[in-house]
Each structure stands twice: as structure tokens, then as C-alpha cells.
């Protein structure tokens, strides 16, 4: 299944994207795709509704805005330097364990929403990533069982302000958490439709120029390992999102760096999971 949320920002309704391309409103049956939904067997109930022909589900205007496919999560956990090429272009040695940081969930954004340059920013960067949505509570999960905790997958872009991240006290979260810096979507593809999350192509284009082009098999630490590893340090609850890292080709890794400017267009995609498209705009306009 492919789950969507549509409507004005902060007031989205749940829906589904059918195989024939139609978008149907599921709000008559389900309140939202949030922690409660995933924790209470919502995915199973949604599948039953879809398999039954989506009774009462009205067609969604194809021009309606799509929001992030899950409601704002309790946690947005990110993995840094999880691709060899990116780790090398950012300098330093390859990590021997996953590098974790948090991204404020107030950065949550839709798949086609503008990304806003924060006040005082001068080094805006992009990072295409595979996002994992947790489907059931995960605490000290065995690596062999960790994928059983996954509800689904989506395309994600970890927008970053590198000056805030690296030149203001070494706190990565400062450069990762501005409003609009966490677009995800355009839908959530359920885990049963992704046989192997380590066999997906991912790419990023800026103004039509291919900047990032890799596949998830290049991860230093697999999705299976990451979920198990993270669950040692915090409980992952249903609806939480794990962003699994970005490949090489970010703006900061170029010589000279080619940071984003107002008016640029960023397109991120993961094979089979859909694409994001962000227009870069200045703060206040």
C-alpha cells in the first residue's frame, strides 16, 4: 500500500494512493497516520479497507497539496556519514559505529513544499536519504528481527545549514532543524512492497543537474543494523522516523562548494518510493 496525507499544512487528512493512480480519502475510516494508528493495528485495518474496495472513500483532487505521509513523529533520528563516499567528502575517518543525531520534528514538511533559507544562513545543503517509519515499539531489538518493526519507507531530504552545523559550537542539530528542513514523501510505501531496502537507487538533482547518484547497498550500516543499534539507546515508538544517511555529492563536498541559493530547485528520489521537489526560497519570501 501507499499512504498519503493531503490538505493544508497542519490540517492534513489521511488517504491512499491506489495502483491505478487514484488518490482516495480515508478520513471517514481513520483519524490520521500517527503513533496511535500504527500502534493499534491501523495498517492491517487500512489494508482490509483497501482490499474491500475502499467503501465510502471519495476521490481526492489530484491538485491537492500532499503533506508528509505520516503525522509529525515523536522522534526524527538521523544517521550521519553512513555512505563511504559522503564520509570521505566530509573529511575524517570512516565511522566504526553509526553516528546519530536528532532533527527537530518542527522541521517536518511535505514532499513539494518550499524549503526556506533561515535568517543568517549562507551554506544551505541537500542530502537525499531513505527514510524508515517504525511500525511497532522497538527497544533492544535483535538485528535479525529489526525489519519486523518497520511500517514502511519513504524518500527524505535532510536539508542542512553547514555554517550553523559546523561553525557554531559543533552542534549538528543547529544546522539540521530549521522549519521546512525535513520534507518526506510523497507517500509511505508499506514494508511488504520493499523486499530489500539495501537494493534501492537514490538520487538528487539541483536545477536538473544530477548531484547525487548511488544505491542503498553502499550504506556502511544497513537498515536492519541501524534499527537494532538505535533501539539500544532509545525506544523507537510507532510513527518514529529514521533517516538512514546520504551518499556522496553534497554541495559542501564539491570544490568549490556549491551551496543552494534562492530560486534553486532540488529533486530527490528513491527507487520505487517517489520523489520530492523543493523550491528554495528566501526567509519571508
Image (cartoon, grey):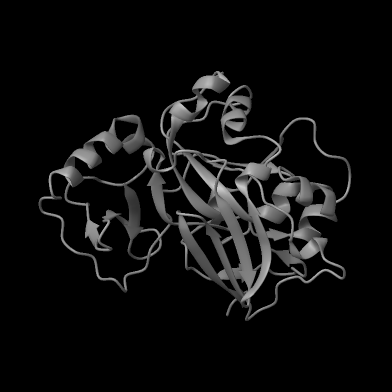
Q: Position of residue 238 (x, y in %)?
A: 42, 33
In the figure, is residue 65 to the left or right of 52? right
Q: Quadrant of residue 258?
A: bottom right
The residue at the point 26 percent across, 46 percent down is 31
**Relative to 183, is 136 on the left or the right?**
left
Location of residue 150 in the rendering, given as x and y in whole percent from the top left corner: 45, 34
Q: Say how many tags the image has.
A: 0
- The answer to whether residue 274 is above or below residue 280 is above
Q: Is residue 225 left or right of residue 24?
A: right
- State the image coordinates of residue 212 (x, y, percent, origin top left): 68, 61
Q: Is residue 113 visible?
A: yes
Q: Is residue 66 above or below residue 91?
A: below
Please tell me which residue is depicted at 37% across the width and 42% down the height of the picture.
34
Look at 66% across and 79% down and name the residue there: 262
Q: Tell me which residue sits at (26%, 34%) in the image.
A: 44
Say if 134 sits above or below 84 in the image: above
Give the side of residue 121 with respect to residue 281, left or right: right
Is residue 70 in sight in this rendering?
Answer: no
Residue nearest the observer in this picture, 38 or 3: 3
Residue 32 at x, y percent in the picture: 30, 47
Instruction: Identify the image quadrant of residue 78.
Output: top right
Question: Which quadrant: the C terminus?
Answer: bottom right
Amino acid at each position: 500500500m501507499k499512504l498519503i496525507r493531503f490538505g493544508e499544512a497542519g490540517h492534513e487528512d489521511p488517504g491512499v494512493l491506489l495502483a491505478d493512480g487514484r488518490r482516495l480519502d480515508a478520513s471517514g475510516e481513520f483519524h490520521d497516520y500517527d503513533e496511535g494508528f500504527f500502534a493499534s493495528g491501523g495498517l492491517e485495518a487500512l489494508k482490509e479497507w483497501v482490499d474491500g474496495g475502499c467503501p465510502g472513500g471519495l476521490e481526492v483532487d489530484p491538485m491537492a497539496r500532499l503533506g508528509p505521509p505520516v503525522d509529525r513523529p515523536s522522534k526524527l533520528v538521523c544517521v550521519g556519514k553512513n555512505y563511504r563516499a559522503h564520509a570521505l567528502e566530509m573529511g575524517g575517518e570512516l565511522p566504526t559505529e553509526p553516528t546519530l543525531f536528532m532533527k527537530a520534528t518542527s522541521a517536518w514538511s511535505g514532499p513539494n513544499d518550499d524549503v526556506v533559507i533561515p535568517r543568517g544562513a549562507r551554506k544551505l545543503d541537500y542530502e537525499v536519504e531513505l527514510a524508515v517509519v517504525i511500525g511497532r515499539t522497538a527497544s533492544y531489538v535483535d538485528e535479525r528481527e529489526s525489519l519486523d518493526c518497520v511500517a514502511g519507507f519513504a524518500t527524505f531530504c535532510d536539508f542542512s545549514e553547514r555554517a550553523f552545523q559546523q561553525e557554531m559550537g559543533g552542534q549538528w542539530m543547529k544546522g539540521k532543524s530549521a522549519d521546512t528542513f525535513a520534507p518526506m514523501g510523497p507517500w509511505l510505501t508499506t514494508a511488504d512492497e520493499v523486499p530489500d531496502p539495501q537494493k534501492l537507487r537514490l538520487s538528487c538533482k539541483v536545477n536538473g543537474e544530477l548531484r547525487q547518484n548511488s544505491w542503498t547497498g553502499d550504506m556502511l550500516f544497513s537498515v536492519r543494523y541501524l534499527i537494532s543499534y538505535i533501539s539500544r539507546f532509545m525506544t523507537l515508538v510507532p510513527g518514529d522516523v529514521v533517516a538512514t544517511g546520504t551518499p556522496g555529492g553534497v554541495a559542501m563536498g564539491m570544490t568549490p562548494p556549491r551551496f543552494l541559493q534562492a530560486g534553486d530547485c532540488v529533486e530527490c528520489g528513491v527507487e520505487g518510493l517517489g520523489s520530492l521537489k523543493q523550491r528554495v526560497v528566501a526567509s519571508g519570501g
